[in-house]
Amino acid sequence: MGIVKIDDDLHEEIRRASTVMCRSINAQAEFWMKVGMLAQANPTLSFNEIIKAQLVAAQVHIPEVAAA
């Protein structure tokens, strides 16, 4: 574990987002870093595809949405 220096404005955005997403500030920053790393490594995947792949990898059951 280390210390990461981030801009004060970015820290404020992380704080605001963490409130909405019910995460700690550190958990929100870690989430954004992980998704950013995965997006950079997989540039053809959308955000939703990245999240779905992570849920599948964690063996989270993802219910299918019924078509209207």
Image (cartoon, grey):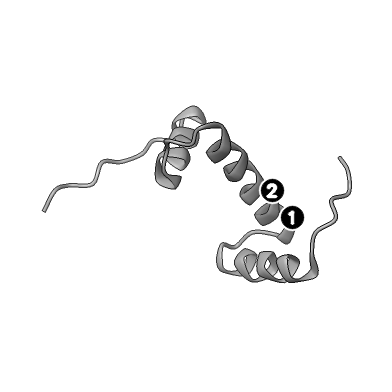
Q: Residues within 10 Å of mark 2 (few under 14, many from 20)?
A: few
Pointer 1 residue: 26
Which quadrant is home to the N terminus? top right
Label 1 and label 2: CA atoms lie apart by 6 Å
Q: Residues within 10 Å of mark 1 (few under 14, many from 20)?
A: few
What residue is rendered at 47% in x and 42% in y?
51
Q: Quadrant of residue 9?
A: bottom right
What residue is rendered at 66% in x and 46% in y?
33
Q: Quadrant of residue 10?
A: bottom right
User: Would residue 15 appear left or right of 46 to someone viewing this image?
Assistant: right
Q: Is the residue 45 above or below the residue 11 in the image?
A: above
Furthest toward the left, the residue is 68
What residue is rendered at 17% in x and 47% in y?
66
Does the residue at mark 1 contact the one at mark 2 (Cβ under 8 Å)?
yes
Q: Where in the figure is residue 55, as x and y percent of width and height?
A: 47, 36
Q: What number is the disc on residue 54?
A: none
Which quadrant is home to the C terminus? bottom left
Pointer 2 residue: 30
Q: Is the residue 25 above or below the residue 32 in the image?
A: below
- The amino acid beneath tag 1 is Asn
* Depth order, front residue of 20/9: 9
User: Would residue 62 appear left or right of 28 to someone viewing this image?
Assistant: left
